[in-house]
Image (cartoon, rainbow, N blue to C red):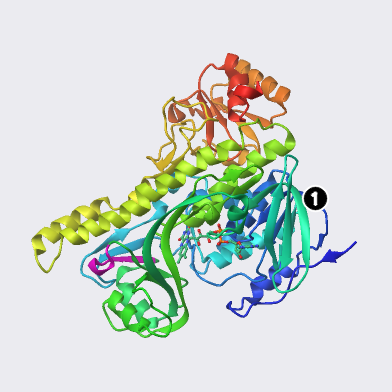
Amino acid sequence: MRRFCIATDGETDRIPCRLINKRVTSEARVVQDQKSYDVIIVGGGPVGIGLAIDLAVNGVTCIVVERHASIQRIPKGQNLTPRTGEHFRRWGVTEAIRAASPIPRSYGSGGIASYRTFMSDYHYEWFNRAKIVNYYAATNERLPQYETEAVLRARAVECEEITLLTGWSFDTLTQDEGGVTVRISQTSGDEHHTVSARYVVGCDGARSPVRQAAGITQTTDPHDRLMALLVFNSRQLDEKLSVYGDKTIFNAINPDMNGYWQFLGRVDLDCNWFFHAPVPAGTTRENFDFHAFLEKAVGAPIDVTFDYVGFWELRLSLADNYGKGRVFIAGDAAHSHPPYGGYGVNTGFEDARNLSWKLAACLQGWGGEHLLESYTAERHPVFASTRDDFILKSIIEDREFTDAYNPDLDLAGFKEAWGRRAAGDDSMVTQYLPHYAGSPIVCGQSGARSGATGRHGFAARAGHHLSPPSLPDDADLWDQLGKGFTLMNLTGDTALTAAFTAAAERRGIPLKTLDLAAAGLVNMYEAEAILVRPDHFVAWAGAGAEGDAADILDRATGMFGDDQ
Ligand SMILES: Cc1cc2nc3c(=O)[nH]c(=O)nc-3n(C[C@H](O)[C@H](O)[C@H](O)COP(=O)(O)OP(=O)(O)OC[C@H]3O[C@@H](n4cnc5c(N)ncnc54)[C@H](O)[C@@H]3O)c2cc1C
């Protein structure tokens, strides 16, 4: 039987990253032609590899087809939420992620917002994701996306369930009731092969050939902005910004930018930086003075050595559906947007967590007919809200602010408005709380709507992330949650546990039960029992539901209506 290997060649348009390539290719397995997998993942970026690892945790086999052999060394996707930290815990990579971070954890993770330039007299502390860590079982992390990807790839090649095939590109797909067949080609070569699986997931970025091949449409809000991304070294910038102390990100709200961000971030503590901002249409590497552009944003002369200058079109796109038949999309393939608020890869990882257990449930026979539909029902409104309530809102509010206030015309009015802004400008962190309150598979309030806004708290609410507290004996509740569903019995009501256990066994649903009566959590969670999903969202929270256990489990696994 013919076997084909992971490609090992580098690519000329990429900054070499020998360590990363070695870690991936030296451990990678070969793939056997015609072998069938549970899932084919197209795209071995962060979301594709994260999904592969989560599927492996759930006992599902997959092949990841990635067109590039090397990881693109562009320092994007740096700002990771505490919720993403929980994914890293589940995937067993927390320590490796921290070891790969070029900025030590002792260094601050927050930022500075300023007016017009980074060295402005008008500035305030801004965007500190550490503010919400108490509600998560992990901390926020900060490292360039290429380091995250290298860690995830190294983890993936350790998993027996995952076959990682780099240097091969997705071409086309066909699907029927039994599965999906995908044709792939060597990215730099003439060979073609077909691979079959029960499901395909396109984690293949904003252009997503899989989305297009499946006929999934998307809605785009074109902003007609050309964005430049600059990666550079500057010791003088480091010296100048040291006046702010340990800060990693800087956003200068500039009237000339019409609400779009001038955003600067530290890559490491060796004076390497990235910067992105809109540039005039038609700008190229050759016809624009990027050094002067940077100095204008900083508000002072600085030395600059450029490593990379790139461009992208700023637009917001959202797929109208996250799946069609047996084909699904996740990450930037489903939603792409400017990196305002650092939601991109964090949202993509949550897509992966949401989809992974549902695919596992259907493959293992305990998922109901409506379970996979709930992937779109839950994740689509979350990104629509992220787009409208955070990203677009920020552009509009910044535009309105700079239109209304100008220190050169009315200093007192500007100072007063700037002070108000400084006092309340943390909503992108503190009010960002993706939830599925309106999901068809949670037992919540009728009429509730899913979205991305909310206030963090410990009360267990159906469709919301479970905030895990420290237990009195310092035991870690998060570690005790099962890989499948978990019934947290907070009162020790044995009849309730027995009812859920019996109903789960009849349906083949993996359910772990925890007797947490001694922990005294009823007041904090405002519930006597909580059914936690495999992605650690609350499916149901309440009291005295012995008689309803079967219905609750049916709903949580998408088995309702026609299934019953
Ligand atoms: C400047 C900048 C800063 C950012 N900062 C943040 C941040 O702070 N926080 C945050 O959460 N997000 C941030 N983002 C967004 C984040 O980088 C993206 O959301 C993330 O890369 C999406 O991951 P993905 O795996 O979905 O897609 P991608 O990273 O685009 O990966 C897609 C993969 O699919 C592969 N592929 C494509 N076509 C094929 C094919 N035909 N066959 C096989 N493989 C294919 C590609 O090679 C690629 O490896 C930032 C983005 C930018 C540009």
Point out the image quarter for the C terminus: top right
- In the image, is the residue at mark 1 within 8 Å of ligand 1 by its beta carbon? no
Residue at the far top in the pictured view = 547
Determine whether 152 is above or below 290 in the image.
above
Q: Amino acid at mark 1?
A: Ser
x and y percent of residue 165 in the render? 73, 63
Point out the image quarter for the N terminus: bottom right
Task: Write the residue at 31% across / 77% down.
Answer: 240
Task: Write the residue at 78% across / 61% down.
Answer: 193
Determine whether 457 is above or below 428 in the image.
above
Determine whether 286 is above or below 381 in the image.
below
What span is colored magenta in the figure?
Answer: 249-258
| Label 1 secondary element | strand
The quarter of the displayed image where residue 396 is located: bottom left
Instruction: Kindly tell me whether residue 93 is visible in this rendering.
Output: no
Determine whether 365 is above or below 68 in the image.
above
x and y percent of residue 192 in the render? 77, 65
Q: Which residue is mark 1?
A: 36
Task: Write the residue at 25% across / 59% down.
Answer: 399
Instruction: Return the residue nearer the eye: 357 or 208.
Output: 208
Reply yes or no: does residue 194 show up in magenta: no
Instruction: Return the residue nearer the eye: 385 or 464.
Output: 385
